[in-house]
Amino acid sequence: MRPLRSAEVIAVGSELLTASRLDTNSLFLADRLRAIGILLRTKAVVGDRADDLDAVLRAALGRSDLVVLTGGLGPTDDDLTRTVVAAALKRPLHEDTAISELIRERFARRALTMPEINRRQAMVPEGATVLPNAHGTAPGLYLEAGEHVVVLLPGPPRELEPMFDAVVRDHLRARTAGTRVYTRIVRVFGRSESHTEEAVRPFYAPWASMALPIEVTILAARGAIDLHLTVNARDETEADEVLVPAVRQVVEAIGDDVYSDDGEAIEQVLARQVTTRGWRIGVAESCTGGLIAKRLTDFPGSSAFVEGGVVSYSNAMKTRLLGVPEALLAAHGAVSEPVAEAMADGIRARSSAEVGIAVTGIAGPDGGTADKPVGTVVFAVVTPDARVVRTRTYPSFGRELVRDVASHAALDMARRLIAGLRVP
Amino acid sequence: MRPLRSAEVIAVGSELLTASRLDTNSLFLADRLRAIGILLRTKAVVGDRADDLDAVLRAALGRSDLVVLTGGLGPTDDDLTRTVVAAALKRPLHEDTAISELIRERFARRALTMPEINRRQAMVPEGATVLPNAHGTAPGLYLEAGEHVVVLLPGPPRELEPMFDAVVRDHLRARTAGTRVYTRIVRVFGRSESHTEEAVRPFYAPWASMALPIEVTILAARGAIDLHLTVNARDETEADEVLVPAVRQVVEAIGDDVYSDDGEAIEQVLARQVTTRGWRIGVAESCTGGLIAKRLTDFPGSSAFVEGGVVSYSNAMKTRLLGVPEALLAAHGAVSEPVAEAMADGIRARSSAEVGIAVTGIAGPDGGTADKPVGTVVFAVVTPDARVVRTRTYPSFGRELVRDVASHAALDMARRLIAGLRVP
């Protein structure tokens, strides 16, 4: 038999098609399958309709080695997974009396009589291996059909997850090629998705033609770009042999805009920079309204290097709590480089922070002028060694995104300043 | 042409098949489609592979009237949606120079040259309507093909959502059967999901048997509960006839824990309360690290009532910027009712805020003691008329959730205090 390489997950249940319910089992399965070298190729959510499930199942069998179905194993009429799979694979269903006995006992332990409909859960397609369910009545099923493997798992995560880890994984691993997927993430800030791709595209062809080919995915979210470099390898050493030099190529091609070559968040990078220097960070925020302080304190242990900050949403707060001179505000306006710099100096002077980060701007949708349109954000970062003040204009991003991107930009500016890099 | 009744959503992007990324656009779309009487029948996630996307698309066209594809409209090689749809529907692609000009201008406004690859985003299948994208470079596309409608939307929610609401909905509604779904949202804080359900369950049977039956969905997220009451009606007047009295019943059954009977966010409720009194809010945050200030300033126009705040992550900040006496910190510890009250008084004294909100606590995972375990959070709210101090313990929620729930709890405490309600 050929090794299992690709998989599809089909989640069954009409409730998963509503606005309020999300299939999260597939995330668990993606992670577990990837760990044993099986690539999740497609996933689907199907309501409790036999015709739809049948069509989606047949399509999946047509392209993937492994099909995992979750849910629809309950005792009621709308639980169709068992019967649809049996029909598609042409395996008659027989009652497994050992299972019905187990279910009966489960009910008896709670002093209940098993409802007759629960006998449906004891129906097993010919040739299937029964997967015991330690946390519920519906057993799972494992079937080999030609080159394909089909696995049926119960929908509740607290039943599905232990069942996968206890029995399914070993069944599957015995049929894989023995490799798994390894990923390295390079994180970039300060250039667009397209400019990032332009820089790394020359590597695509040579990487794809290596003995262990590298696959590249570029993800852009909220102003930051992530490059995922992936290989299928036997072990970490083999993976590193190709990934380490590839990551080095990316870092060289992109330069200072790379803030992490191992998937670290910008907050963690900055945390490391300041803690090795014994510094603490203080933040003075206007338009970001507390978001930078919130981000820095998202991580456990942040009290070791975060002093705190001032959200100076009003001019009075800038004057009273940060000591920004009223004359400066009157002369230049709250959104100006002199005021941003005074805010950064102010938070340093009024706290024990060595690093002062200040942001003032117009997040919108109102408050813009011809001179300073909505999206204008002024940044200042001051350390014991250096200082930088910059103005950026983010056009038509919308309030939320301006604040998100501005908070990332402020942290990235601090990273560059502390590392002694040029701040564009 | 027959009316649109059923839909499929296909999310495109290999990143959506990893363990860390979830397609949430389909939830938004399920909700919006439902509102105009279109049932979501299946959804799928496909990686950046033309063959898989082609197969899933053809299957969807075989069973649903409407197919909505999200993502894969970017400028890079792995953005395949446009070309695969054009091929499947046999519509040649032409460059729409008006679009390439718009993209070029977008780059020019940021003083950048458009990379040549971005011209891909200007390719339009014959006969398609171009949907302008106010928040990004990739336009959406709307195609009618025989009895089918195919819609291509950009992947980022902040581009997809306004595009759907601004143009797609009206296109689709013109092709539906005429009724639509009307929803009223009642928002609750301060009781569990099950206790909320217990209070409203007696209404379920009478509501379900009305001429226009009301459907109820209860959603719990981050400590807050939303009750969605929906009816299928011809127009708003018809819907209001049943929904308005039903909402009144819910509000009476749940009482003070209802903070909104029309879907308003807690921040907006509080904003209204303080602006009608001519008050401003100041925040003093320790464990929430800026999150409360951030939430209050998430909404446009918040500068009218948000004074700002202090993130006093260190004791020194509490003393220096909020005037909390060192002796108080030494006697009671930073996480204590006297300190929380001093923080709320401190932010009022040091700003023009009439309302002072203070939070200090142990978000975890470290820092807990036998007396004050992880999850202990102390709140204080002071207004010109009243004050309240409370201690809550959130067990084993995890750092992020403790911070989220605590920020909501602080805002809700302020709501109750200002409204003259009892604060439990």
Image: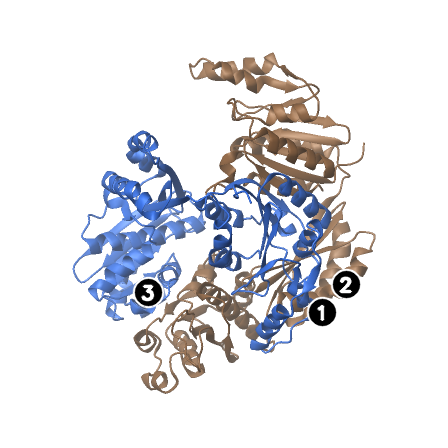
Chain colours: A brown, B blue
Of helix, strand and loop, which one carries label 2? helix
Q: Identify the mark at residue B6; answer none if there is no mark.
A: none
Q: Quadrant of the N terminus of chain A?
A: top right
Please identify, in this view, whether the residue under mark 3 or under mark 2 is nearer the observer.
Answer: 2
Q: Is residue B283 left or right of residue A201?
A: left
Q: Quadrant of residue B317?
A: bottom left
In x, y percent, where is residue B94? 69, 63
Q: Are marks 2 and 1 in contact (CB under 8 Å)?
A: yes
Q: Which disc is residue A203 wearing?
A: 2
Classify A114 as above or below B413. above
Of mark 2 and mark 1, the one earlier in the sequence is: 2
Q: Is residue B133 left or right of residue B401?
A: right
- Say the numbered circle drawn on residue B318: 3
Work out whether A407 lies above or below B254.
below
Amino acid type of the residue tagged 3 in the rendering: Lys
Considering the numbered disc 1 on the image, is that residue within a helix, a strand or a loop?
helix
**Residue displayed at 58% across by 23% down:** A139
Observer able to see residue A108:
yes
| Disc nearest the viewer among 1 and 3 | 1
Residue at point 55%, 70% (across, down): A415
Q: Secondary structure at mark 3?
A: helix
Write down the chain letter for disc 1. A
**Disc 1 target residue:** A253
Measure how far apart labels 3 and 2 are at the Cα level. 52 Å
Q: CA distance from mark 2 to mark 1?
A: 10 Å
Q: CA distance from mark 1 to mark 3?
A: 46 Å
